[in-house]
Image (spheres, rainbow, N blue to C red):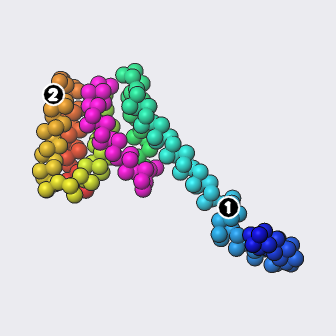
Amino acid sequence: MRLFISTLSLLILYTTHTTAGSNRLEQKNKDLFIVPDTNTNQRNFAGWEILENEVHNCMDSITNSTSENRKKLLYKFISYSEKVDGALAESYAFFAFDYVNNHSLDFFSCLNHDDKKFIDSWAQIAAQEVSLGFSDANTPKNYLKELGIDFRSKTATLTGNKLDLADLYLKKLMAYSSKS
């Protein structure tokens, strides 16, 4: 009953205000986020949500990709690197590191000698995740050493150009991780 009376009182008060009073009440409601904001903040939030969905969809697509479409998806993933930040950047870097770590054969199978710049970019993104692991390790040097041993065991079956790319990736990952 109190809620009804309060609501009725506010309605009467609102309708009896002058135009200036009405504008003040409308502004107060906007400040309290009661009235949806139609300026750029609302659009920026929507744009951020779209970007987040695109990045996560790309991650899913890469994970489920075939050898025919994987390279295109990997390059699409890299194209988001300048756009992500905050929590999305953390999941972005984690995926970059984790995908190569757990799907290294798939990752390198679609790349060739001309993809060295791409490897460098991917390693730079993945290094952001590696540097977070430093806090859990005794020392960054030991952590990187263990990481290198694990990576080499996962890429042991690679040969030729694919092995060269894996070595380049590991070298770049270590270098960028040490800088972080």
Residue placed under numbered mark 2 in the picture:
156
Q: Horizontal and vertical percent for residue 112?
A: 29, 27
Amino acid type of the residue that numbered disc 2 sits on in the rendered structure: Ala
Range shown magenta? 83-110
Residue at image position (15%, 41%) is 148
Q: Residue 155's mark?
A: none
Residue at image coords 34%, 47% = 93
User: Quick one: label 2, few (<14), some, or many (20+) residues within 10 Å?
Assistant: few
| Residue 109 against residue 74 in the figure, above or below | above
Q: Distance from label 2 to label 1 (Cα)?
A: 56 Å
104 within the magenta span: yes
State the predominant SS element of the stretch in magenta. Answer: helix
Q: Amino acid at mark 1?
A: Asp
Taking the image as shown, residue 5 lies to the left or right of residue 83, namely right
The picture quadrant where one finds residue 14 is: bottom right
Considering the image in quadrants, where does the N terminus appear?
Answer: bottom right
Residue 70 is a magenta residue: no
- Disc assigned to residue 37: 1
